[in-house]
Amino acid sequence: MNIEQRSEELAAEGGRLLTRQKLTLALAESCTGGLIAHRVSMVPGCSAYFLGGVVSYADSAKQALLGVAAEVLEREGAVSESVAAQMALGVRSRLGADIGISVTGIAGPDGGTPQKPVGLVFMGFANPRGEVTVQRYEFRGNRLDIKEQSCRAALEWLLAYLKE
């Protein structure tokens, strides 16, 4: 099974659990460019739990659409723990979802630095209580590999939360 098929399976299983638990989901994506929303929206019946997604590639979109603070973007950069947290909280709040998941990172092949290499990804998870957790990942591969790995990791995190 390839990574794309695994993500499709994770999205379907996550959808079943979201429906069973009567929870809704919203996504804020930067480096994945809507790939997670695509996988989630491919599941028949996803309208029962998937409220929508925001692709906020530019910093200005993160500010305008998700309420990410300009000073945080200036101080830490778009690929940071704080920005991932604000994105997850922002999409959860603005779309009125129970769960908000965010992804921000450097998919490459350019844009990396020694401090923030290509493949660095931060994901935020805002739960129904409004608590947010952020995880840091360092993926390897080309641009598509990094996007696919990020998608899979986000869906695995959702599943792990729903199975708690």
Image: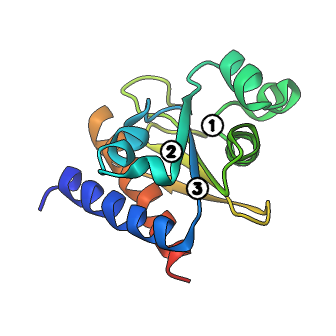
- What residue appears at the point 80 percent right and 30 percent down from the top-left corner? 67
> Mark 1 or mark 3: which is in front?
3
- What residue appears at the point 71 percent right and 30 percent down from the top-left corner? 77
| Quarter that holds the N terminus | bottom left
The quadrant in which residue 126 appears is bottom right
- What residue appears at the point 84 percent right and 30 percent down from the top-left corner? 69
Which residue carries the number 1 mark? 79
Q: Is residue 73 above or below residue 11?
A: above
Which residue carries the number 2 mark? 120
- What residue appears at the point 53 percent right and 32 percent down from the top-left corner? 30
Query: Label 1 is placed on what type of residue?
Result: Val
- Of the numbered discs 2 and 3, the one sitting upstream in the chain is 3
Under tag 3, what secondary structure? loop
Give left or right: position of 156 versus 77. Answer: left
Res. 24 mark:
3
| Nearest the eye: 44 or 160 | 44
Q: Are marks 1 and 2 in contact (CB under 8 Å)?
A: yes
Query: Label 2 is placed on what type of residue?
Result: Leu
Q: Is residue 76 above or below residue 82?
A: above
Q: Is residue 142 visible?
A: no
Taking the view exactly as shown, the residue that stands out farthest to the right is 71
| Nearest the eye: 53 or 46 | 46
The quadrant in which residue 16 appears is bottom left
Q: Is residue 7 visible?
A: yes
Q: Residues within 10 Å of mark 1 (few under 14, many from 20)?
A: many
Q: Are marks 2 and 3 in contact (CB under 8 Å)?
A: no
| Nearest the eye: 35 or 11 | 11
Q: CA distance from mark 2 to mark 3?
A: 28 Å
Q: Is residue 153 above or below residue 85?
A: below
Q: CA distance from mark 1 to mark 3?
A: 26 Å
In x, y percent, where is residue 45?
36, 52
Query: Label 3 is placed on what type of residue?
Result: Thr
